[in-house]
Amino acid sequence: MLILILFVLQISLFLAGMGMLRKGLISLTFEKIEKRLLFFTDHPLKAFLVSIVFTGVLQSSSAFMVIVIGFVSIGALSFKRSIPLILGTNIGSTFTTEFLAVKLEFLIFALFAVGAVLFLTRKPPFRHVGVSLIGLGVIFFCISGFSRLAVPLSQLDSGAYIVRLVEHSSLYALLIGTVLTAIIHSSSACVGILMSFMDQGVVGLTEAMSVVLGSNIGTCITAVMAAFKGGPAAKQTAYAHVLFNVIGVAAVYPLLTSLTGFISALSASPAQQIAHFSLLFNVVTSLLFLPLTHLFHSFIMFLIPNNGQAR
């Protein structure tokens, strides 16, 4: 029971760290992102590229999608122009997982110390950077904690049952990734936990890849919730995000076993293997979809009519 409590606390602390990192970055860049985003949506490729950058800066595809849906809801951005942004945000979100795969635990105390000093200066730019650094320190502290808890968790009855499910079927692993990400509203947290379990040999690569695919679906829950009270265009944007991720997962899932050898050859580090898989999956699916944005737009319009509102 104590192990489970510690695990839940670690997840909560990790999410708090992500929140601090995001808060600091948003405080530094949010107004610029809001002001400039609409200027980059006049061409699909431009919108696609800028969404990669902005999502990377925000460290959250969910946060970026909330901004996009907000613009769509007020009519500042059409649903059609939001589609390249949806495709790009999936790539931008992988920057976080690539960063988490780098072992920087030795910098934890330095991040806390420098972050605290900058935070105490009370000058806005330095204060925001300080918040981000403290958040980063919390994140790496939690990653280290997840690694220490991985084996004890897998030995609990409930933990052993979940591990058996994951090992038994990649489909179960995919569902677990979807549900966990939807519950904690963070694919980064899900993948961070997964990396720690892989480092301890609790989860294999193929199963971990399935969890990552599931997290790509689960992360859509925030966009769906953001669009819940919006108009048809907002719902179209949210469900386009869901459908795009589901189609991508459905296309790649049957190939997981074949891809395992290739992914394992990319790095000796299990954490980096899964980070690289996440990056490649999102880059390939987004690039394949980009030329089809017009068809995708028409399909979503067919599924969810906009009742004469702006498209």
Image: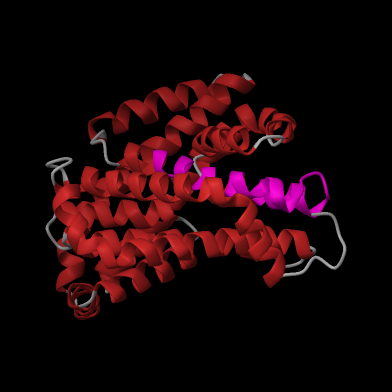
Check the image and report above or below for 92 versus 121. below
Q: Main secondary structure of the magenta part?
A: helix
Relative side of 90 to 45, left or right: left
Which residue extends farthest right? 308
The answer to which of 206 and 130 lies nearer the viewer is: 206
Check the image and report above or below for 296 versus 92. below
User: Taking the image as drawn, is residue 184 in sight?
Assistant: no
Percent x, y of residue 131:
51, 32
Badge count: 0
What's the residue at 68%, 27% (across, down)?
A: 32
What's the residue at 55%, 20% (across, down)?
A: 126
The answer to which of 25 and 231 lies nearer the viewer is: 231
Magenta run includes residue 73? yes
In this figure, which colouring scheme has been used for the structure?
secondary structure
What's the residue at 69%, 62% (across, down)?
A: 236
Percent x, y of residue 76:
81, 44
Percent x, y of residue 209:
27, 59
Magenta region, residue range:
66-95
Check the image and report above or below for 165 versus 24. below
Q: Quadrant of the C terminus?
A: bottom right
Q: Quadrant of the N terminus?
A: bottom left
Relative side of 25 to 78, left or right: left
Relative side of 33 to 96, left or right: right
The answer to which of 46 and 235 lies nearer the viewer is: 46
User: Taking the image as drawn, is residue 186 in sight?
Assistant: yes
Residue 128 figure quarter? top right
The answer to which of 230 and 298 lies nearer the viewer is: 298
Percent x, y of residue 9:
38, 59
Magenta run includes residue 244? no
